Amino acid sequence: MFKNDLKKAVSILQKGGLVAMPTETVYGLAADAKNPDALKKIFQAKGRPVDHPLIVHMGDISELKNWAFNVSDQAYLLAQKFWPGPLTLILKKAPGVLDLITGSQETIGIRMPNHPVALELLKMFGSGVAAPSANRFGRISPTTAKAVAEELGSSVDLILEGGQCDVGVESTIVDMSGKFPRILRPGMISVSEIEQVLHEHLSSQQDNLPRVSGSLESHYAPTTKTFLMDQSQIQKWLKQNPNEKIALMIHSFELNKNNIHTTQMPKNPKEYAHDLYHTLRELDHQGFAQIIIEKVPNESEWAAIEDRLQRAAF
Ligand code: TXA
Ligand code: MG
């Protein structure tokens, strides 16, 4: 059954269709990265502006040379250390890479996902697959097959079941195409882990930024109004608004008020990230007036979570 699904998925990709593919971060909406008509369907299905570049996913590091040009030793070091895994490298694009992939820029985003279903699919397909997160533009990324169906419904030809995503937030994006490595999107591979491999500091300089849709201030957002507060702000708010029908997401303290829908989030950032989108999505369905989320620590292991919460609440 599993093998059959993968065979069907490969045949859909070969015919220019769309397949939702589980990865370790979030589910991706996959299409043949060399087929412009298939790529156009991705933008249509997501409602995403066409100048936003796509990440190419590959099943083997040896494919890198087909997509990227002049890959530095430093970039190879990162690929060898973290692939397959939740790291995307921005590199100079190889000649012939389609403008729909790069957003007409000179660079390309590439990663090798660490999920058995994705890896098997990519190996069977034998070429690069473009895959943005399988959500409507600006919305919460899906971390289950069910969430993909909610987001994209019939605009995807096949949804591969791969369980709930392990990591739960999108990959770390590192730009290795310029003079200095720099971080474009924080993920669960932290800046310090990357710096340890490179023996070099990562810049977070934000000028001349390539277009990164996840860098918009509002993104990864529920439809319910969402706010970030620290513990004391939450306590105060609850006193002042005793009758509001709200949902709370807290992690550092406990609250036993039976009139308030409280989700106790994990204290550990890895587990928190794993639960984050799933929890937001579930709460978003329940018609609360607001979602109030406790701020997370200002520490490097929490950077990706902090980033997503800021955008969800913008
Ligand atoms: O974890 C992930 O990266 C997931 C899974 C499915 O692999 N994918 C994902 O794709 O998050 P997407 O399209 O939702 O976000 C990719 C981000 C976008 O913000 C895009 O602008 C940026 O990567 N990006 C892609 N190519 C780029 C490039 N050449 N230069 C700068 N940013 C790029
Ligand atoms: Mg996305």
Image (cartoon, rainbow, N blue to C red):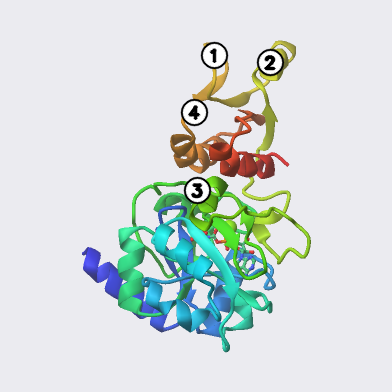
Disc 2 on helix, strand or loop? helix
Report the Cα–Cα distance between label 4 and label 2. 17 Å
Q: Look at mark 4 in the image and give the residue it sits on.
A: 265
* Amino acid type at image mark 3: Glu
- In the picture, the disc for residue 11 is none
The amino acid type of the residue labelled 1 equals Leu
Q: Residues within 10 Å of mark 3 (few under 14, many from 20)?
A: few
Q: Earlier in the sequence, mark 3 or mark 4?
A: 3
What separation in Å lies between label 1 and label 2 (alpha carbons)?
Answer: 12 Å
- In the rendered view, would you say 305 is above or below 90? above
- The answer to whether 51 appears left or right of 160 in the picture is right
The mark that comes first in sequence, 1 or 3, is 3
Q: Is residue 288 left or right of residue 33?
A: right
Which of the two discs, 1 and 3, sits closer to the camera?
3
Q: Position of residue 192 (x, y in %)?
A: 54, 46
Q: Nearer the viewer, mark 1 or mark 2?
A: 2
Nearer to us in this view, 119 or 106: 106
From this viewpoint, is residue 118 visible?
yes
Instruction: State how many labels appear.
Output: 4
Residue highlighted by disc 3: 193
Question: Which is nearer the N-term, disc 3 or disc 2?
Answer: 3
Q: Which numbered disc covers residue 232?
A: 2
Residue 177 placement: quadrant: bottom right
| Mark 4 or mark 1: whose residue is earlier in sequence | 1
Tell me what residue is drawn at x 36 percent, y 64 percent. 118
Indicate which disc, 4 or 2, sits on the residue closer to the N terminus: 2
The answer for how far apart the CA atoms under marks 3 and 2 are is 33 Å
Residue 255: mark: 1
